[in-house]
Image (cartoon, rainbow, N blue to C red):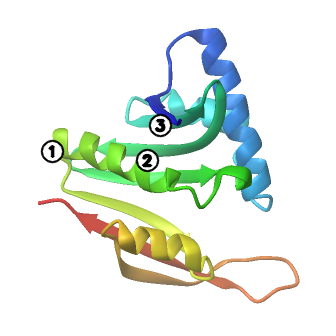
Amino acid sequence: MFDIKILIDEPAKQVATIQAVAAIEAIIQPQDAWGYQTIIELLAQDSIDLLVVYQIDKVVSYCLYQVVFEQAEILRIGTHPDYQRQGIASRIFARLNKALEANQVESLLLEVRADNTSAIALYEQQGLAVIHTRKGYYQIPHRPAIDALIMQRIYV
């Protein structure tokens, strides 16, 4: 039903895929979505890859991540609201973990808003644990600041 792939090199398909990822970003992270140009610039770096989940030809989820030597970091991960709660993120993690282990990555980091309880539960289920809190990191106009949690999974 769902197919997970590393971003395809075919230019026309790549443009459409990145536009779809940016569109999902705009829906799920309206305060600080990364647009098409930001994603393109990030993907120009050799250390950054994009996993994309398709349902037929439609992009429904993605994971933008970076690997530098023995450490990986999830920069962005998201699923279109119409496809959430279907186990897609868990499948992304399974694919990502396999790739990271094959590349001898020792740890995986990510940052999450402290009020994003469903994401935190998913990350804990995937073996990540909170290792640090950035107090008041997320500044939202007319609302109290929200902490950022730094989570990590160790592979070795």
The residue indicated by pointer 2 is: 92
| Secondary element at tag 1 | loop
Distance from the alpha carbon under mark 3 to that under mark 1? 18 Å
Q: Residue at x 61, y 26 (%)?
A: 56
> In this rendering, would 54 be left or right of 95?
right
Q: Which residue is mark 1?
A: 104
Task: Classify residue 131 as left or right of residue 111.
Answer: left
Q: Give the structural element (helix, strand or loop) at label 3.
A: strand
Q: Residue lying farthest front?
A: 1
Q: Nearer the viewer, mark 3 or mark 2?
A: 2
Tell me if mark 3 has few (under 14), some (14-19) or many (20+) residues whose alpha carbon lies within 10 angstroms of its own. Answer: many
Per the image, label 2 sits on a secondary structure element best described as: helix
Residue at left offset 63%, top offset 15%:
13
Amino acid type of disc 1? Gln
Judge by depth and name the residue closer to the eye, 125 or 62: 125
15 to 129, vertically: above or below? above
Where does residue 93 sit, x and y in percent of width and height?
38, 52
Residue at x 46%, y 69% (from the top left corner): 122
Residue at the disc numbered 3: 51
- Tell which circle, 3 or 2, labels the residue nearer the N-terminal end: 3
Q: Position of residue 41 (x, y in %)?
A: 59, 32
Disc on the earlier residue, 1 or 2: 2
Q: Amino acid at mark 2?
A: Ile
Circle 3/circle 2 CB separation < 8 Å: yes
Alpha carbon distance from label 1 to label 2? 18 Å
